[in-house]
Image (cartoon, rainbow, N blue to C red):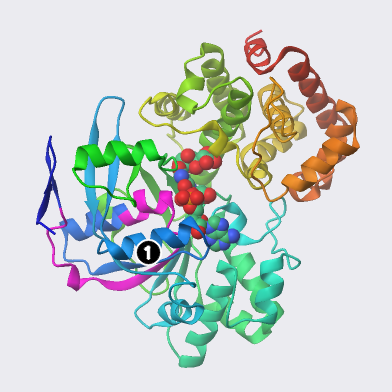
Amino acid sequence: MEQNIVTTQVSVPRPQWNRSRLVSRIVHLGCGAFHRAHQALYTHHLLEGSDSDWGICEVNLMPGNDEKLIRNLKAQDLLYTVAERSAQTTELKIIGSMKEALHPESDSCDAIIRAMARPETAIVSLTITEKGYCTDAASGELDLNHPFIQHDIAHPQSPKSAIGYIVEALALRRQQGSKAFTVLSCDNVRENGHVAKTAVLGLAIARDPQLAEWIASHVTFPCTMVDRIVPAATEETLAQIADQLGVEDPCAIACEQFRQWVIEDNFVNGRPDWDRVGAQFVKDVVPFEMMKLRMLNGSHSFLAYLGYLGGYETIADTMQNPAYRDAALALMLDEQAPTLSMPEGTDLTGYAEILIARFTNPSLKHRTWQIAMDGSQKLPQRLLDPIRLHLAKGENYRHLALGIAGWMRYVSGVDEKGNSIDVVDPLAAQYQAIYQQYPSIEERVRALLAIDTIFGHDLSDNSDFIEHVTAACQQLHRMGARAAVASLRN
Ligand code: NAI
Ligand code: CS2
């Protein structure tokens, strides 16, 4: 390959440092869209501006496209393109922080566990989606009945879950007398480090209580707040990048220009100086996580369900409707911001305004359908935690209630025009069964609210909550999503 890739418009520099200096000190599980545009990019910028040797061993555990991505990365020398897009411009970067890439099918489970157990591996980071933790979304506890977890208890050396890989690799390190590694969750899960810890310890206890004790005293699980809007790449995205780059890159990804990473500074085996390239290390990251999960992700889910039902394909399209835009802002400022306890000086109004501008970026084709995915895993931290706080104080939460109603209508699998919706969610079959069994809105609401793993007992039995969600569902059925959102202005 040439030193630089020359495109029609610009020359996109290949990494200028000697990539042989990289050591796989990070093993990352979940080399999806987000990781490539976030943690791998921060690490790339650090390599660019220092003599750091922190490289990443990329691992995907899921089959299909995730396996194909690992093969494609290997075929192009682990280099790939990130296209950072504002409304007007696109900047291409060739990212060079990856050292290796592994998948259980093309490599082996054992190769992955050995990579995680190598003494130089100091961090195992994760972007495995909310469901990858195999926890109950409402309680955050490990679901010991999860098929992957049952498998991993019976066959620890050939795990299926990310949690199983971590526990097995730590068992090996303990046996070898190696230092532990830090487990760094970068998923949109509330108190993501604590959830990762609960899941890892839950599985370790089921396997070997002494191992669990060793993990509890040797491993840290810092919480992180991660932010960058990175939609799944479509054929169109890849074609646009190829046009600009002059060569095809099946591993390319487009994202917004904004990025943020707030990390609890609690590492047991060293860490890269990501703060030199824009990350923040702090003592307590939880307030920032809550702010982002409720204000950004909460309004994203609201816009995704009600936008999809209103006939909008992307978030930017939805934001073109002033009623949705106003509703998103009111949701953030009136119903999410008041539930937060932020460090003094935090400007939540300014934060909300920036979010509105980010959602409006027309270059990001972020599909409402993509964000609507996996609602069972997302609602608790995005919409339900704040509702609990409003219920306790007797406050109004009508935007949040309409968001829940939007989710309920969405998971029926039929849109307002009678077309079917491809509902992607671990509980999709359960939703279908509920819609088939119960004919009335009231019964359906009650049956959906009875799903404990989403709502917990407290909300399923709360009469105020049942009443408000039922009323919002009735309104949604009566007038449709666009009018229901517009009615929030009254
Ligand atoms: P993606 O679909 O491109 O990648 C998902 C990754 O998770 C893949 O590597 C897949 O192999 C892995 N995965 C899925 N289910 C798994 C399981 N059960 N066990 C182990 N690995 C599993 O999605 P994307 O966009 O990379 O997002 C991943 C996560 O990153 C999100 O769920 C979210 O928590 C977080 N995130 C995403 C942002 C975005 O804008 N895309 C921004 C901030 C956080
Ligand atoms: C989105 C997030 O897919 C979703 O559920 O809400 O991935 C969102 O784009 C990111 O969290 C932004 O940082």
Question: Tag 1, which secondary structure?
Answer: helix
Q: Position of residue 163 (x, y in %)?
A: 58, 69
- Amino acid beneath label 1: Arg
**Rendered residue at 79%/27% (across/down):** 469
Left or right placement of residue 164 versus residue 235 in this view: right
The answer as to whether callout 1 falls within 8 Å of ligand 1 is no
Which quarter of the picture shows residue 195? bottom right
Q: Is residue 45 visible?
A: yes
- Crowdedness of circle 1 by 10 Å Cα count: few (<14), some, many (20+)? some
Left or right placement of residue 265 versus residue 445 in this view: left
Left or right placement of residue 479 versus residue 60 in this view: right
Verify whether residue 32 appears in magenta. yes
Q: Nearer the viewer, residue 472 or 341?
A: 472
Which quarter of the picture shows residue 376? top right
Q: Position of residue 414 (x, y in %)?
A: 72, 29
Which quarter of the picture shows residue 328? top right
- Vertical side of 170 occupied by 271: above or below: above
Q: Position of residue 475 (x, y in %)?
A: 77, 16
Magenta stretch bounds? 14-40
- Vertical side of 68 occupied by 179: above or below: below
Furthest residue toward top: 490
Q: Position of residue 254 (x, y in %)?
A: 34, 41
Q: Nearer the viewer, residue 351 or 441?
A: 441
Q: Is residue 255 visible?
A: no
Of the 4 image quadrants, the one containing the C terminus is: top right
Q: Residue tagged by mark 1?
A: 71
**Rendered residue at 24%/59% (across/down):** 96
Of the 4 image quadrants, the one containing the N terminus is: bottom left
Total number of numbered labels? 1
Verify whether residue 22 appears in magenta. yes
- Vertical side of 6 occupied by 318: above or below: above
